[in-house]
Image: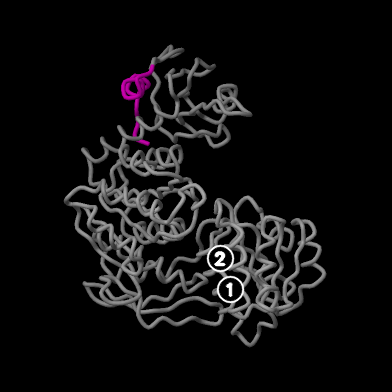
Amino acid sequence: MIALSLAEIAAVTGGEVVGEITPVTVSGSVVIDSREAGAGSLFVAFVGEHTDGHVHAVSAGEQGAVAVLGSRPTALPTVVVADVQQALQQLAKAVVARLRQDGDLTVIGITGSQGKTSTKDLLSAVLAHAAPTVATRGSNNNEIGMPLTALRADAETRFLVLELGARGKGHIAELTALVTPDIGVVLNVGHAHIGEFGSREAIAEAKGELVECLPAHGTAVLNADDERVIAMAARTHAGTLTFGRDQPADVRVERLTLDRLGRPAFTLATPRGDVPVALQLVGAHQALNAAAAAAAAIAAGVSPQQVGEALGAVTSLSKWRMELHELPSGVLLLNDAYNANPDSMRAAVNALVSIGQDPQVRRTLAVLGEMKELGATAHGSHVAVGAYAVAQGVDQVLVVGEAARGIHEGVTGAGAGISTFVADNETALDWLRANLQQGDAVLLKASNGARLYDLAAGLQ
């Protein structure tokens, strides 16, 4: 963050400085975990259901924090405010406004039902190849995570990439009212969180809030393959740049092929010339994520040649997203267990099946768990995933947890005797240890709450 005195922080947050004996300047990071504090940090103290951040002020100070933003005085100099979350947001808004006024900062916002984090990772890698870039860490994309990301920007930052999540109408509008992007990327309108939204139309309405906020000189980067997304062009005053697999998308994936590990190579067709791209990431769906990242980077002024080079250099994404490991036992493990919805489940199954085309792979095994937040569509969606796995030719399915039993029903209902159901992760790990053999390719996929990534840790 840019250096700010406590008086300046109090002025933008409407707070009162308490306990400052000599003038204090925050020159380091802004953190909500005292263990992450460093020299010059500002520790933001939240009161939660199970913990009170104020009691960790001393620990934050021992790590180097010089002040606290909280709702009551602490052992450190404290900016006391009525609403800590609102104060954090106002601080982020003020810092970004100052950076825009004093420098050349471009802000890019990304939303969509799936692929946000992977696309954000790809885009931040491309932009960092061109100039100093700050981007959301992991999926820290909510009303607290977004301002924390914005506050990591400083005078050297050229690009600020913000992943924007939403669990209801108005959420993205609230975030973009704090930091309005210059470029807005909408990836897709799928089924993620449909239990909270109620319908895909409601999801589209909420995701489109991103393009509605864009300034006239900005750019809306839209998925031409998704009719609900491309319709958002009518909701913005900004210019548009589209991406997709087919004409008439402005930035296109052409001549897509996959190697033996399911890694895509393709021609990236752009209005400024075509470039070859060979990704080191697993899954054909990553090609479209790369096209979205490319379109956003081109809108930000990066050349297609730079984009292609940078995309090909990306070796990993955020944790537990299409991580490919070759275990000492000779088993290929594809850990995509961070999150799941019907669309991302199908993409992960496709990636597993692609890997299974390699003659060295003996058998494909999909270990699948619950997809959360699907509301009334939950059971049918799980059944459909099971049927899809059969249709795509997965050799064996291991379904974990009662909430995911519909997947097992979908497999058996499709007439295949390739599914095993287990009640919990412990039983699943025992089954895997007893049944995996050299040459097997294994996919782990479920919503975060199912914790299938614990199976990866157990196998590794």
Q: Position of residue 64 (x, y in %)?
A: 52, 29
Q: CA distance from mark 1 to mark 2?
A: 9 Å
Q: Residue at x 55, y 74 (%)?
A: 351
Specify whether 440 is left or right of 86: right
Q: Quadrant of residue 239?
A: bottom left
* Residue 387 shows in the view: yes
Q: Does residue 41 sit above or below 198 in this rendering?
A: above
- Amino acid type, residue under disc 1 in the picture: Tyr
Task: Choose between 201 and 56: the one closer to the eye.
Answer: 201
Q: Position of residue 102 (x, y in %)?
A: 22, 38
Q: Residue furthest bottom?
A: 359
Residue 315 belongs to the span the image colors magenta: no
- Amino acid type, residue under disc 2 in the picture: Met
- Bin the neighbour count of mark 1 within 10 Å (Cα to Cα): few under 14, some 14-19, many 20 and up: many
Q: Residue at x 54, y 16 (%)?
A: 75
| Mark 2: secondary structure | helix
* Badge 1 vs badge 2, beta-carbon distance below 8 Å: yes
Q: Quadrant of residue 144?
A: top left
- Circle 1 sits on which residue? 388
User: What stretch of residues is rendered in magenta?
Assistant: 1-15
